Amino acid sequence: MYGDVVMGVHSSKFEAVLDRVREENGYKFDNQMTVEQLKDVVREFKEICEKDGHPLPQDPMDQLWGGIGAVFQSWMVERAIIYRKLNNIPGDWGTAVNVQTMVFGNSGDNSATGVCFSRDPATGENYFYGEYLKNAQGEDVVAGIRTPQPMTCLVKERRKIDLPCMEEEFPELFKQLSDIRAKLEAHYKDMQDMEFTIQDGKLWMLQTRNGKRTGTAALKIAVDLVHEGLIDKKTAVLRVEAPQLDQLLHPMFDKNAKKEVLTMGLPASPGAAVGQVVFSAEDAEKTVQTGKKVVLVRVETSPEDIAGMHVSEGILTARGGMTSHAAVVARGMGKPCVSGVADLRIDYEGKFLKVGDTVIKEGDMISIDGTTGQVMKGALPLVLPEMTGDFGEFMSWVDEIRVLGVRANAETPLDAKTARGFGAEGIGLCRTEHMFFDPHRINFMREMILSNTESDRRKALDKLLPFQRKDFIDLFTIMEGLPVTIRLLDPPLHEFLPNKREEQIEIAQQIGVTVEEIAARTAKLHEANPMLGHRGCRLGVTYPEIYEMQAQAIFEAAVSVMKSTGKQFVPEVMIPLVGTKKELDMMHKAVDKMAQKVIAESGHTFEYKIGTMIELPRAAIVADKIAETAEFFSFGTNDLTQTTLGMSRDDAGAFLPEYVQKGIYEADPFASLDQEGVGALVEIAAERGRKTRPNIKLGICGEHGGDPKTIDFCHRVGLTYVSCSPYRVPIARLAAAQAAVRNEKK
Ligand code: PEP
Ligand code: MG
């Protein structure tokens, strides 16, 4: 290791010597070597270093300084850079070195070393968990080269492991270690990850720290610690990282599906994964780029595989224990992992794996269950998890604590149902143009856009009206009186124009004009800058009949649902891309007129709200004036970011990653709000809006609404709610609760 890590001599050169000595003598492990053989190995190792131009320093102090330097240098190796990127750790933090006197776990059979956790870091279950190896040092346990032994008889029985456990081999020391486990947990009030060494029958603790854990474990441990009286609910809420919650929302294998278990390994990181088999991290990255899902299969993983592991659905390894690299990294990433599958043979050259007589080739589908350790051939069906038990209890604490409301961006019945299932308190953004993405409907929308005259457009709108009304009836019905904010049409034209020849033929037939006419009209409507073009309320200003039709559909749907359910609710109509009060006034008047018309025609009176998106810097600056008309604001931070930074949402991908890498922006400003710039505009708009209308409702519905850091910002600015995609609703609820606790502490 010293030669490899400190001197930079490739480890394979040393491994080759060990392999040769093992083979010559028929040894399974290095510690079977005699002292004479070891001396020969050391001599050869020294020669290798010397030949490589890196003679091994003989002064122990020089060796120590070499080691210290290597730790500092490790901050800049590629895998550390990737790890930081994946975990949002800034590169300028740097690292630190502890110099510590060590004891020897490899000084004979009365010595050992191990890694243990005070609870199971994969499931969170409260039992002593870990692995150890007799006559070994720390790296032997974690490197996945030798399969370690379990700590307790419980684990041995449960996993049917045919190796002696520490409880049997070192009963006295095991008892001592168990007491330390209890003491440390009570002191730190959190699950501990501990390393220990036994040297000639004496137990030494090397370190303890709060243990890394899966989302499942984080949640279970937090709930259990509250029940055990060790922490309060507010602390518990901080113990589960918001993005980790995502793991609990991922699909699981359908319990009712028929499955044939090919083999079993250790359940190293829970969850279900289905994908094509790949045998290297590079192949994983390449295959995923083609839109496929993969399971990475390795004899063992090493830190170099980290990028490939990240893109895989799951990881399967032949060697290694529960604390091996693959297991630890997979748990950290929330990826399902099955490790230590003893009967798995892998042929990297031939690109296939074998279990008994079954051969699985690269590209074949497999399914792995990181919760049970089972490996299945083929693709097993997946189902969504249930939100009950510990999860339900934890989320009830989250909802008690948070101040911010959480809504969802949803337009289809399925999205709305999913959002409610995840606890959304309303719809914060229904993008009406998305209701026409469906291939059966898009041509009606195209017909409307391509109309040359108002009367043609009205004809097309008449066809759209029933669809819209039906969609809104569905949404209002599903949301059962919860607030629903419907945004009037905001179609960036390039997303809807028929650019392909076949599309033009289809729409020409539908309207009954020539393809040439369609092509000419499409060309005329082409915009060089569609995101800053004829969209949002500009469409309503130039073609008022479009927004009139939508307002009619919304109010008629609302009346229909209010009548059928006997319950009143307040539909919210939102005008997009407003920059001036005048635009909003015009749209407000048109929508108002429609509401009055529907009330008169239906004989049913109801309340409604008309508000606006704040998506342009100008709108933020004149928010006091806009609030004279708008009853609510929703910050469209996608466009507000685009227009404030002067970076196109569609084109920034070409240079933005480099901007983030070079630290110009701390994170992608389209994913996590640029608080200093765009955030300042949000603050200005909130303040000015409230000046005019003190109780104005303020929401955010850009992509940022589901980002925990942005949610913290929204809490501080005092917004009313955040709105995000349905699957991020639980994450947003948790992030909102964490923002409340953190800012209270400050
Ligand atoms: C926004 O701009 O943030 C927004 C929510 O609207 P869209 O993404 O539809 O432009
Ligand atoms: Mg927008």
Image: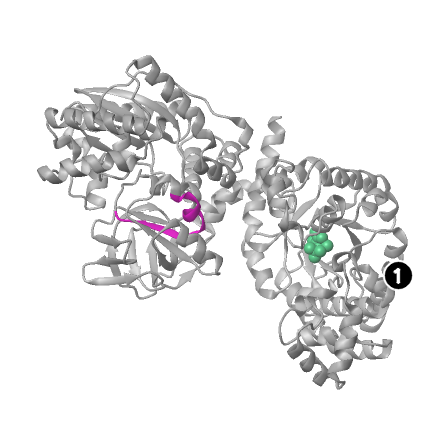
Residue 367 in sight in this render? yes
Left/right placement of residue 683 relative to residue 7 reads right
The x and y percentages for residue 583 are 87, 56
Is the residue marked 1 within 8 Å of ligand 2, measured from its CB? no
Query: For the image shown, how many numbered marks are present on the structure?
Result: 1
Pick the quarter of the image with the N terminus.
top left
Residue type at mark 1: give it: Lys
Residue of label 1: 589
The x and y percentages for residue 639 are 73, 51
Q: Quadrant of residue 60?
A: top left
Residue 402 in sight in this render? no
Viewer-closest of 173 and 404: 173
Viewer-closest of 395 and 277: 277
Q: Quadrant of residue 567?
A: bottom right
Left/right placement of residue 459 relative to residue 76 reads right
The x and y percentages for residue 577 are 79, 55
Give the colour scheme shown: one colour
Q: Residue at x 65, y 64 (%)?
A: 475
Viewer-closest of 366 and 232: 366
Q: Is residue 316 magenta?
A: yes
The x and y percentages for residue 600 are 85, 70
Q: Is residue 10 magenta?
A: no
Helix, strand or loop under label 1? helix
Residue 375, compared with residue 403, is above or below; it is below
Viewer-closest of 368 and 719: 368
Task: Locate ligand 2 by image quadrant.
Answer: bottom right
Residue 121, compared with residue 745, is above or below; it is below
Q: Residue at x 66, y 67 (%)?
A: 435
Q: Quadrant of residue 277?
A: bottom left
Tell me where the magenta segment starts and ends, as one range.
305-318
